[in-house]
Image (cartoon, rainbow, N blue to C red):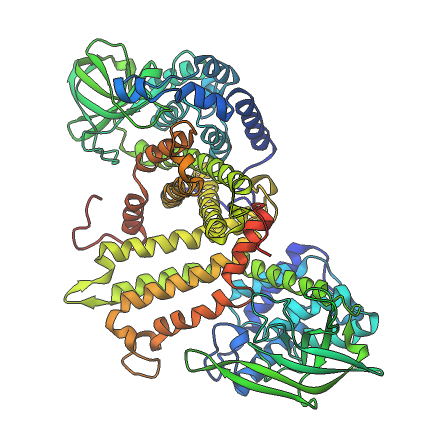
């Protein structure tokens, strides 16, 4: 890691980041990247993105707020600035998303000194990719219904079970893993959190799951008598649920960050829809002249601008009735906006929306229908939008708990 | 036009917080929900059966004038308090939250129009409004209910330095609560603005029989009404009306945002108390999730409202787009909030006695007034997509 001497002035750091990104934006990837890092499937994409993350890390744009002892830069409040500038510069995303936005914050909060020193640096550089082992076939929205077991065996634990929807599992060196360590304590009690080796580890099988688009996008991970040293246990035995909540809160926080910085994506999406409408002519009538299509596009333009302004308002306590009211909405708003925009693109493209991306006649390389079909990944992942609405109803509005 | 960098807090600083909180406290004290119900919805018969105007609290209004709310939008030279649009929106949200029956929005709207007109005549009238001597409303809408400023309801003819007005202005808000009409008229190719007293010779106010119990509305007939030179607020008002329109939209949007939040919180409270199947009904996701959806829509409208106000305050060329987005979002959110409030209250919400209908009807009026969501989006599409080559209705 290069030694960089930052000024402690946020404006100077922002200028530095902006300048560095302008000068170091990478050449286009050898193959088209998926929309989000969790969908990265090929070695070519991975190598390209890992190189980019390492470069950003060495330039001081990753790990800004992590103490120097763990490979970071020891600043405070700079990561947000770096993230905003990376969004703004429209450079490739950081591949180690699970590591940066979920594993690292959880380890920083619950880990021992040894664990922080061992796991954080590789997470920041992107040399060690992380995946998440929370969901199971029987534990989706009801996350506490964990079946994967860990049994104590001397200085180790023996893990058996089945995790699903494991994005990046095929490239991951490590997994943040929730297990059940006590059969007596039900549900939230009796769970323990591990940092589990994946790549090349005995007893671990990573198998691709095929999405409804026909593409591979994530994996299932099978554990057969997998040995995990007790030194990789995070926090106390039986405290796994609380640790998992730290991870989910960090994940939501990252989504909010993406919401506040990522509004440009919303504006671009509206621009793309308008372009599509102007280019789509059926029976001599341009879609951009159709009143219903115009209204539908404007509805989404209003949602896009609303998200942008809500992200702004979330930073003004005097204009927020409840501190979590806007932040907790961002996942629902962003994912449903993306879905509605894609659905509208399908509607405007009309008959051409029947065409798969490899059909040369497909407009925009078949982008609209494929995005639409893919959009359900986001409305389901990271807590379905139904679960998000429970959380909003209960925590913000104060309605009785569903469970 | 300036394109300044938008402030992080929309310009909502300590003064604006203080004004809003004072307004909330004052209206919480003076116009709690049960008092509002007794005031405007004691009995449906007088208003709906006999076409009487809904009662309003003139003492409360006098106290509000005393506080200077009618001078909020008026410059310091005219002895107003020159509060930013975002600050005014905060106060109007409270008025909406309490369904305040008053000529507050009409007077602020008329003041903003006069201020945009900028003539000496307009400034002289503003001084009177700021002093609380007279309240005003806009008479700018024609029989078809066009929300285009250029579609003036009246015709003006010159007579020496005076103008003579003829015609009928429709959908005039709270005309019976004010002394002054700011009326728009066609003078040949030009759009003119005139200040006409409600009791001037040749002016007849005919009360509309309306649903909303928190305002009055009139059809105002002008028969050879003489307007002296010092009452011509603008001899050429097209540019001023374009400039001020976003502010008019923002005021109504703020009212809907406040009223809708009240409906949301009131319905949440009910869902926590009302027990069916041995549980508070808010436990059920068929109740919980729609309330969350209402919250999301209100928040979208509220964020867009502050954005619109900040753009207006900055004199930005983007103010029209921002304000039309806010009005569209607020109209739709308020419709949704009203709809779910009644439905989720069940039978009791449908009764006269329970009083939710007071908010429902005020929201309904505001949704339509100055153009609903569909209308705003049609205007937005003309700006953001470009004019439609086929006929897409009014534009």
A226 lies left or right of B90: right
Residue A99 rendering spot, x and y as whole percentages: 65, 72
In-image side of A381 versus A57 (left or right): left
Image mark count: 0
The foreground one among B106 and A160 is A160
Residue A127 picture location, percent across and down: 67, 81
Residue A222 shown left or right of residue B132 in the figure: right
Q: As drawn, which residue projects farthest toward the front?
A: B277
Quadrant containing the C terminus of chain A is bottom right
Visible residue check, residue A306: yes
> Residue A203's spot in the image, x, y percent?
68, 89
Can residue A64 be seen in the rendering of this structure? no
Residue A269 percent across, percent down from the top left: 40, 63
Q: Quadrant of the N terminus of chain A?
A: bottom right
What residue is shown at x 22% (from left), y 24% (from top)? B169
User: Quick one: which residue is furthest to the right in this view?
Assistant: A154
* Res A71 quadrant in image: bottom right
User: Residue at the location (72% across, 62% down)?
Assistant: A242
Residue B32 to residue B228: above or below: below
Q: Nearer the viewer, residue B282 or A206?
A: B282
Q: Nearer the viewer, residue B84 or A223?
A: A223
Q: Quadrant of residue B186?
A: top left
């Amino acid at each position: 890691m290069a030694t960089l001497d930052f000024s402690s002035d946020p404006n100077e750091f922002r200028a530095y980041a902006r300048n560095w990104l302008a000068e170091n934006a990478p050449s286009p990837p050898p193959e088209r990247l998926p929309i989000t890092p969790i969908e990265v499937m090929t070695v070519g994409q991975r190598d390209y993105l890992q190189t980019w993350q390492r470069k950003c890390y060495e330039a001081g744009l990753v790990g800004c707020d992590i103490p120097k002892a763990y490979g970071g830069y020891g600043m405070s409040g700079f990561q947000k600035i770096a993230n905003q500038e990376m969004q703004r510069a429209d450079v490739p995303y950081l591949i180690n998303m699970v590591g940066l936005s979920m594993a690292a914050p959880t380890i920083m909060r619950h880990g021992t000194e040894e664990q922080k020193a061992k796991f954080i640096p590789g997470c920041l550089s992107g040399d060690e990719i992380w995946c998440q082992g929370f969901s199971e076939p029987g534990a989706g929205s009801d996350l506490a219904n964990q079946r994967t077991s860990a049994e104590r065996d001397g200085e180790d634990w023996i893990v058996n079970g089945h995790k699903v929807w494991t994005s990046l599992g095929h490239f991951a060196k490590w997994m943040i893993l929730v297990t059940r360590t006590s059969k007596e304590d039900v549900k939230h009690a009796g769970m323990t959190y591990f940092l589990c080796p994946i790549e090349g580890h005995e007893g671990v099988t990573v198998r691709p799951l095929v999405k409804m688009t026909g593409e591979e996008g994530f994996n299932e991970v099978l554990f057969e008598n997998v040995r995990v040293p007790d030194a990789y246990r995070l926090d106390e035995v039986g405290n796994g649920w609380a640790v998992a909540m730290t991870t989910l809160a960090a994940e939501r926080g990252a989504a909010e960050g993406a919401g506040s910085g990522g509004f440009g994506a919303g504006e671009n999406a509206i621009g793309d829809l308008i372009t599509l409408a102007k280019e789509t002519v059926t029976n001599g009538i341009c879609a951009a002249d159709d009143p219903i299509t115009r209204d539908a596009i404007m509805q989404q333009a209003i949602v896009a601008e609303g998200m942008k302004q809500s992200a702004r308002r979330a930073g003004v306590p005097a204009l927020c009735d409840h501190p979590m009211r806007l932040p907790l909405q961002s996942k629902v708003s962003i994912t449903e906006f993306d879905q509605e925009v894609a659905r509208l693109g399908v509607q405007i493209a009309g008959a051409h929306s029947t065409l798969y991306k490899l059909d040369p006649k497909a407009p925009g390389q078949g982008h609209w229908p494929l995005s639409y079909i893919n959009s359900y990944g986001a409305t389901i992942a990271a807590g379905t939008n139904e679960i998000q609405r429970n959380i909003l109803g209960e925590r913000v509005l104060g309605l009785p708990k569903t469970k | 036009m300036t394109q300044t960098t938008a402030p992080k807090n929309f310009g909502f600083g300590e003064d604006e917080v203080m004004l809003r909180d004072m307004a909330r406290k004052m209206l919480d004290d003076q116009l709690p929900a049960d008092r509002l119900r007794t005031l405007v919805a004691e009995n449906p018969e007088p208003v709906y059966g006999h076409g009487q105007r809904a009662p309003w609290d003139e003492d409360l209004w006098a106290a509000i004038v005393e506080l200077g709310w009618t001078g909020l939008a008026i410059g310091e030279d005219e002895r107003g308090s020159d509060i930013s649009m975002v600050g005014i929106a905060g106060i109007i949200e409270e008025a909406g939250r309490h369904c305040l029956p008053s000529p507050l929005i009409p007077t602020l709207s008329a003041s903003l129009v006069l201020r945009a007109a900028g003539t000496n005549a307009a400034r002289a009238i503003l001084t009177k409004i700021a002093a609380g001597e007279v309240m005003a409303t806009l008479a700018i809408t024609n029989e078809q209910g066009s929300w285009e400023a250029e579609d003036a309801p009246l015709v003006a003819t010159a007579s020496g330095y005076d103008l003579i007005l003829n015609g009928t202005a429709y959908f005039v808000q709270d005309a019976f609560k004010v002394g002054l009409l700011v009326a728009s008229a066609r003078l040949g190719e030009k759009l003119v603005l005139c200040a006409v007293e409600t009791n001037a010779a040749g002016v007849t106010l005919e009360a509309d029989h309306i649903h909303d119990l928190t305002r009055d509305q009139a059809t105002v007939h002008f028969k050879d009404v003489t307007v002296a030179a010092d009452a011509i607020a603008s001899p050429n008002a097209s540019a001023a009306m374009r400039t001020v329109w976003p502010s008019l939209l923002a005021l109504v949007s703020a009212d809907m945002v406040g009223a809708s939040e009240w409906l949301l919180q009131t319905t949440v409270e009910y869902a926590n108390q009302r027990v069916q199947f041995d549980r508070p009904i808010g436990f059920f996701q068929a109740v919980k999730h729609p309330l969350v959806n209402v919250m999301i829509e209100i928040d979208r409208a509220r964020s867009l409202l502050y954005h619109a106000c900040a753009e207006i305050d900055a004199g930005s060329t983007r103010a029209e787009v921002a304000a039309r987005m806010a009005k569209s979002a607020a109209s739709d959110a308020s419709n949704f909030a009203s709809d779910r409030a009644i439905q989720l209250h069940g039978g009791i919400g449908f009764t006269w006695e329970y009083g939710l209908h007071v908010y429902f009807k005020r929201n309904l009026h505001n949704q339509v007034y100055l153009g609903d969501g569909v209308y705003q989006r049609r205007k937005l599409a003309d700006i953001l997509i470009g004019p439609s080559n086929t006929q897409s209705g009014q534009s």
